[in-house]
Image (spheres, coloured by chain):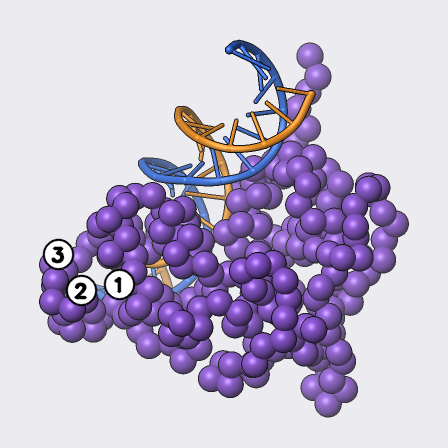
Chain colours: A purple, B orange, C blue
Amino acid sequence: MARQPYLKKGTWTSDEDRKLVAYVMRYGIWNWNEMPKFAGLQRSGKSCRLRWMNYLRPDIRRGNFTREEEETIIHLQKKLGNRWSAIAARLPQRTDNDIKNYWNTRLKKRPVISKKNNSVSASETSSSIEENSCDADSSTLLNIPAKVELSEPFAYTTTFSPSGCHQAVEVDNTCSMSEQFVSSESYWGIQSFLEQPLMTQGFDCEAMWHYQHYYDPLDDFWVNPLVL
DNA sequence: AATCAATGCAACCGCTTCTTT
DNA sequence: AAAAGAAGCGGTTGCATTGAT
């Protein structure tokens, strides 16, 4: 009987993140079960998919949930039950796993939800809702610059639109400028991977590289100008 | 400063659903 | 229509971090 190749489990390292992101950005998603070996990862396809979907995708917003998001979750959970993917579909930049975790660790524990204005009373939320200066209101949830923070030193920024087409957007000035940067070290880490010979054929590799940057010599950073 | 408990979240597991042949 | 494989989903676990003593 053929021995199963060793498959790593547990927390992802920055190197693994880098490999997966670079691979997906170059080749796209074609088959999660086959991808890991081409990407040089000793992970199951399932693990790769989960990592990408829940953490590495560029269109994910991380950090504190806004009051509006929180109220949406509460409302939809009441309406749909624990159908986290359905709830996540209404909050396009949040993952089902994030929403599930948020519900299980915070919202579920709340004893009383006020029906008045469909909101939670101040006494119940004062300790749990933190204002986030980068939060967008619900009308601008889409098409805002998204950021993925990987384990140091790898990070990149991009824009995302629900249709899958990249388009110019305004930089949210309320967010710190650092969110527009990726260090030169990280940039070259990605670039060197991308310059390696192709390992598979038949994919539109160039089309995958939407993520463009320019170098700012003053800060020694590669800046994402928010793609065309 | 050290230890323990509580908390939050990333990741795994097993099952279901969808797609392809 | 059936079978097989891939992808998606939700429940759960385990570890890292934080706070309390």
C-alpha separation, residue under disc 3 versus residue under disc 1: 15 Å
Q: Which numbered circle lies on residue A71? A: 1
Q: Which numbered circle lies on residue A118? A: 2
Q: Nearer the viewer, residue A66 or B12?
A: A66
**Amino acid type assigned to the residue bearing label 3 in the image:** Pro
Secondary structure under the numbered disc 2 in the rendered image:
helix
**Residue at 26% from the left image edge and 63% from the top image edge:** A71
Query: Which percent across, then down, holds residue A120?
Result: 17, 66
Q: Do the numbered discs 2 and 1 sit on residues whose CB atoms are within 8 Å? A: yes
- Chain to which the residue tagged by mark 1 belongs: A
The answer to whether residue A12 is left or right of residue A219 is left
Which residue is the extreme one toward the right?
A197
Does label 3 or label 1 sit earlier along the sequence?
1
Residue bearing the label numbered 3 = A111
Q: Is residue A14 visible?
A: yes
Q: Tell if the residue under mark 2 belongs to the same chain as the one under mark 1.
A: yes
Secondary structure under the numbered disc 3 in the rendered image:
loop
